[in-house]
Amino acid sequence: MRTNVSDMTAILYLANRGPIGAAALAEHLGMSRPATTALVDRLERQGMLERVRDPDDRRRVVISSTPAARTAALDAWMPAIEELDAVCRSLSPEDGARARDLLRQLTGAMSRGGRS
């Protein structure tokens, strides 16, 4: 499976969030609706995403990831996850605490998006 960052982001978001509409996916990805439709079309042809009727509103279609997509995402990320795990395990308790503090600060800064 050939994927780019937007493809993988969409797959992982849908795997974690569950089925959503195309407009909500476009907003999350920061993409236009036409670009998101092209992404969904491509990933649907690859068997990574599927369009299904919304169980709460049969007139609406939602997009969900497939088991194949979740497997592909895990396969793609597992080597990095294992390496990061090994690095974290090698840290002393003090360095681990400093790293967690730094990550909390960085996550907060990213969440604020430059707004203090």
Image (spheres, rainbow, N blue to C red):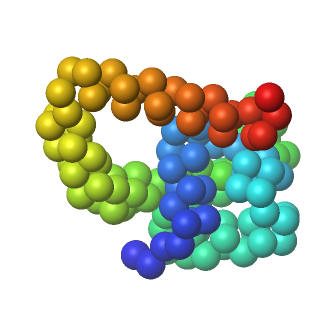
Q: How many marks?
A: 0
* Residue 91 appears anywhere in the view: yes
The x, y position of residue 100, in whole percent, is 40, 26
Q: Quadrant of residue 43?
A: bottom right
* Relative side of 97 to 65, left or right: left
**Residue located 34% across and 56% down the image:** 77
Q: Position of residue 36 (x, y in %)?
A: 75, 66
Relative placement, left or right, of 68 versus 114 is left
- Residue drawn at 73 percent across, 48 percent down: 28
Q: Is residue 12 left or right of residue 10?
A: left
Name the residue located 17 percent from the left edge and 43 percent from the top edge.
86
The answer to whether residue 22 of the structure is visible from this angle is: no
Frontmost residue, 61 versus 81: 81
User: Quadrant where the N terminus lies?
Assistant: bottom left
**46 in relation to 111, above or below:** below
Is 36 located above or below residue 106 in the figure? Answer: below
Write the residue at 78% across / 72% down.
Answer: 35
